[in-house]
Every structure is written in C-alpha cells, then in structure tokens.
Image (cartoon, rainbow, N blue to C red):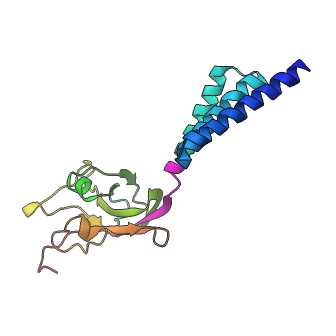
Amino acid sequence: MNTQIQFASVLLRLNIRNNRLKMHLNAKFVHFTYFFVFSVKQVPIIIGMGANMYRNLLFLGILLIAVGNLFADEIKTTIEINGVIVNGGLVYVSVYSNENDYKEEKAFTQFILQPVNSGLKYSLDLPEGEYVVSAYQDINGDKELNSGLFGIPSEPVGKTNYNLRGAPGGFNKLKVSVNKNSAKLIVNMGKVKALGII
C-alpha cells in the first residue's frame, strides 16, 4: 500500500510540475524539451535506476537523434569517369562542394580508383547541393599531376562540365547539382587541348 501511495504521489508531483511548465514556456520546442527531460528524470526514481544510467541513456538518445538528422538529407550519388587508360596508372578523384574550397583545393572528399576499365563508377552519399568533380590519371606513378608547356597537364585529366579545350574555368562553370532528381556526376578524361588545336 505504501508503495502505491508513493507511486501516486510521484505521478501527482509530476503532473503538477508539468502543468507549471506549460504555463511558463511559450515556445513549443523549448516546452517539449523541458517536459521530456523532467519526465524522464522521474523514471529512475520510479523503477530504481541510477542517476548515471539515466544521464547516459538520455545522452545516447540525443546523440542518435542528432546523427540521424545529420545524414537524413544525403543522396546516393554515382560518379562516372570515362576515358580512363586501362592499367595506365591510378585515377585520383577530388570532389568539391563550394567555390572557395575549389580555389584553395580543399576537397570535400577524395578517393583513388584502379584503372581496370575505360569507364569507372564510384558511389557515395552526398548532401544535396552543387559539386565539381576533378580527376587525373597518374601515368608515371609519382602521385602528382604533371604539367608541360604553359602549365598544360601532360597527363589525362577531367572535370565535370569540361570539354578539355583550354582552361576549365571556375567552380560556377563546372558545378553540377545533386538532388533527388539528379544524382550522377560525369567526368570525361583525356589530354587537354589548347584553344585552336584539334
């Protein structure tokens, strides 16, 4: 009987404090947060859990929600690279997500592909947005993009929206949108041709 009375007393106090919270909190999100934390706080008292266990469970729950929101809008994207020289050297690929990072060569993500076919595909999850993909094939194996006269690359290169004639241009010229309706980024690789040279 005493246990039932104590349990009823706890629930009564919980209800009274909850009503006070409703009166003083205007924002729905803030109200929900306070009510959730206060309500869950009573659980250790009722079922005999330790306070540390409660805090750990609460932290874990919040962390899982945050991680879920972080990856909720990511889109399965395919990067297609054409014109690869089979067994001609590793293909180094960089993905850029904004103009400043592109200028400073700070890639959003990078990866290396084996040149097993002339056409390569790579899948990854990207947030919805605009991207430039840049790639080069390391023919001589020195892990660098080599250049010749006037800085023109001497190894095969490629970028999204680049026809390999003259300078490729900046981020805004090369960018491709990734969204639910379009999730493919295509790069055509080859030797850069100076303007006027076929």
Look at 66% across and 29% down and name the residue there. Answer: 41
User: Quadrant of the rendered structure where residue 147 is?
Assistant: bottom left
Residue 48 point in image, percent of width and height? 76, 21
Q: Is residue 105 located in the magenta-colored stretch of the structure?
A: no
The quadrant of the image that shows the C terminus is bottom left
Tell me if 115 is positioned left or right of 196 in this view. Answer: right
* Residue 187 location (% of width, % of height): 34, 68
Q: Nearer the viewer, residue 40 or 132?
A: 40
Say left or right for 162 vs 43: left
Residue 78 highlighted magenta (yes or no): yes
Identify the residue at image location x=26%, y=64%. Answer: 156
Could you tell me which quadrant the N terminus lies in? top right
Q: What residue is at 59 percent from the left and 43 percent from the top? A: 32
Front-most of residues 52 and 35: 35
> Whole-percent x and y of residue 106?
27, 49
The magenta span reads 69-83
| Residue 101 visible (yes or no) | yes
Where residue 125 appears, x then y in whole percent? 48, 56
Q: Residue furthest left?
A: 150
Quick check: can you spot residue 61?
no
Disc tally is 0
Q: What secondary structure predominates along the stretch shown in magenta? A: strand
The residue at 66%/39% (across/down) is 19
